[in-house]
Image (cartoon, rainbow, N blue to C red):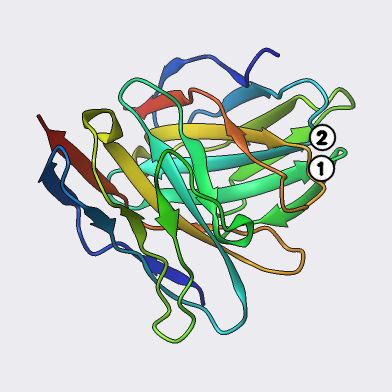
Amino acid sequence: AQRVTQPEKLLSVFKGAPVELKCNYSYSGSPELFWYVQYSRQRLQLLLRHISRESIKGFTADLNNGETSFHLKKPFAQEEDSAMYYCALTPSGGSYIPTFGRGTSLIVHP
Amino acid sequence: KAGVTQTPRYLIKTRGQQVTLSCSPISGHRSVSWYQQTPGQGLQFLFEYFSETQRNKGNFPGRFSGRQFSNSRSEMNVSTLELGDSALYLCASSLGNGGPTDTQYFGPGTRLTVL
């Protein structure tokens, strides 16, 4: 069975501080990992996916197969980063049955 | 492009009733997925439709069903409503080709309250 764990329900930092949102997963095969974000009063949207190896809005995430983690990082948090962040996993190779973590609320104080 | 739309935005039903929710995908998108979001269980995948066929299914009872029309619009139906079905139901559309740039775009959701 696939599982995604986001150990922190809430993460509170000050503007300019580094941010790391943790995501741990369990899956027997090779997963595809995603981060979704939901800003206040906005729709859920894809932030980034591990296969793209891209940086979006200054955020990066590296898939660590050994530690089964996909932590989201940003070196300098901005107030506009305040949002709910969800980590998600889907099996690779075809069938799309995603599993989401419970989400972490990030609050960036001025 | 217009985004994903869902109707109605809010619904109140009583136990035992049935409900139908509608989702209109972004033009050109052939895949529509449905999710249930509750405080207790978080965001859970219900099913995905592609070209009028259910392609993937989550772990929900048969009371939850869906369909997709030839114009890619989708409906989901919940029969014999239970209190625990109260949730935000999200729909998301995508091209559905499974490629590395195939991105899901979410709708605003339908808030269902079962009394």
Crowding at mark 2 (Cα within 10 Å: few <14, some 14-19, many 20+): many
Q: Residue B90 location in percent, x, y?
A: 52, 33
Disc 2 marks a residue whose amino acid type is Arg
Q: Secondary structure at mark 1?
A: strand
| Numbered mark located on residue A75 in the image | none
Q: Residue A15 location in percent, x, y?
A: 15, 37
Quadrant of the image containing the C terminus of chain A: top left
| Residue B12 in view | yes
| Residue B85 in view | no
Q: Residue B78 location in percent, x, y?
A: 56, 36
Alpha carbons under labels 2 and 1: distance apart: 6 Å
Crowding at mark 1 (Cα within 10 Å: few <14, some 14-19, many 20+): many
* Residue marked by disc 1: B50
Q: Residue at x 56, y 84 (%)?
A: A28
Q: Secondary structure at mark 2?
A: loop
* Residue marked by disc 2: B30
Q: How many marks?
A: 2
